[in-house]
Image (cartoon, rainbow, N blue to C red):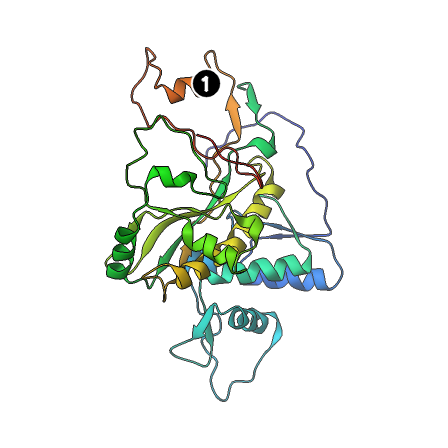
Amino acid sequence: MQTIRERARDIPLVHKTDVLVVGSGPAGLAALLAAARAGAEVALLDRFGCMGGNITAVGVEGFAWYRHDKTIEAGGIGWEFEQSAKEMVTAVSESQSLNYESDSEGFQLVADRLVEDAGVAHRAGAQTRKTEPEEMMAALVMFHLAGADKPAFIEGARADPQTYRDWGGGGEWNIETSGKEDDMFSPFVYKPFQQAIDQGLIPAHLSTIAGTWGAMHDTGELTYMNLIHLAGIDGTDPDSLTGGEIEGRRQTMLPIDALRQFMPGCENAWLRNFGMTIGIRDTRKIDAVDNMTEDDLRHQAPFDDTIGAYPEFIDGYGIHPKRTLTR
């Protein structure tokens, strides 16, 4: 095997712990929960933005498919995974045994809760500059739905068509445009979530829940649900990323419930999958010879080395409680 010799260097020490668990699959989750409950300080290192390993990242939803009438119940943390998934309505009866199959997407929420309750921590030469976290572009948690009724959904969207002008209709998503986009169709959704806020189903401070859907498939899948926007997430800080992953998944269940109640065609919709990782739009920026400005973007400034021009709006800044977004 060929090798490369690296120079000796000092590696920053970011965290000390009694027990380090590498990998958050079923075995890793069981190990970290057992150690934390025994009183040890536990840290978890995982390469993905969600926990669960084969259950979530791979999709092996069955955990104990061998259980039958005469099986002696082992109990333990594995059994606790299943019970927690049933309580959070993210499990269904498995086809070949008495087991309950944990939905690979819903189990992300189960794992979040188990690990948070146990108090476990997580961590995964050009000159740069970085915006302060409270001023960074909002982070996203994307998801897809299944089980929607396409004809009913499309009919509902056509009955109340949304345009870019409607993005100024409330909440935190207010825009400035040159006017030419105002009458263009936009797959924007806000009203169901305002109705949910009015009825106390979504907390009032989560007026940031709004955004777009991407495609409505014949199979009943409603994809590219861009509704969750999280302020203050620092994409260069592992702790901030972890907090954003968990909070974003938690918030996702609120608009899904609102869509079921207030959006035609979504009455029987259910969560199909999350994006594998949180969407980060703003971290370090190279301090270049010529830094692009907001004015350059708004007015499609030409440069000698330009290879393409994109829409002239700035997306994602200003998602703060009691504060508006301008583009």
Q: Tell me which residue sits at (29%, 58%) in the image.
A: 153
Q: Is residue 5 left or right of residue 310?
A: right
Q: Is residue 322 visible?
A: yes
Quadrant in which the C terminus is drawn? top left
Q: How many marks?
A: 1
Q: Is residue 265 above or below residue 245?
A: below
Q: Which residue is mark 1?
A: 293
Crowding at dot 1, Cα within 10 Å, few <14 / some 14-19 / many 20+, comes out as few
Residue 40, given in percent of the width and then of the height, sits at 74, 57
Q: Is residue 53 visible?
A: no
Quadrant housing residue 292:
top left
Q: Is residue 53 left or right of residue 260?
A: right
Seen from this angle, which residue lies furthest right? 39
Front residue of 202/103: it is 202
Residue 237, given in percent of the width and then of the height, sits at 60, 37
Residue 226, given in percent of the width and then of the height, sits at 41, 46
Front residue of 317/250: it is 317
Q: Tell me which residue sits at (51%, 56%) in the image.
A: 198
Q: Is residue 136 left or right of residue 301?
A: right
Seen from this angle, which residue lies furthest bottom? 70
- Amino acid under label 1? Thr
Quadrant housing residue 184:
top left
Front residue of 261/82: it is 261
Q: Tell me which residue sits at (48%, 88%) in the image.
A: 69
Q: Secondary structure at mark 1?
A: loop
Residue 205, given in percent of the width and then of the height, sits at 58, 49
Q: Tell me which residue sits at (60%, 25%) in the image.
A: 7
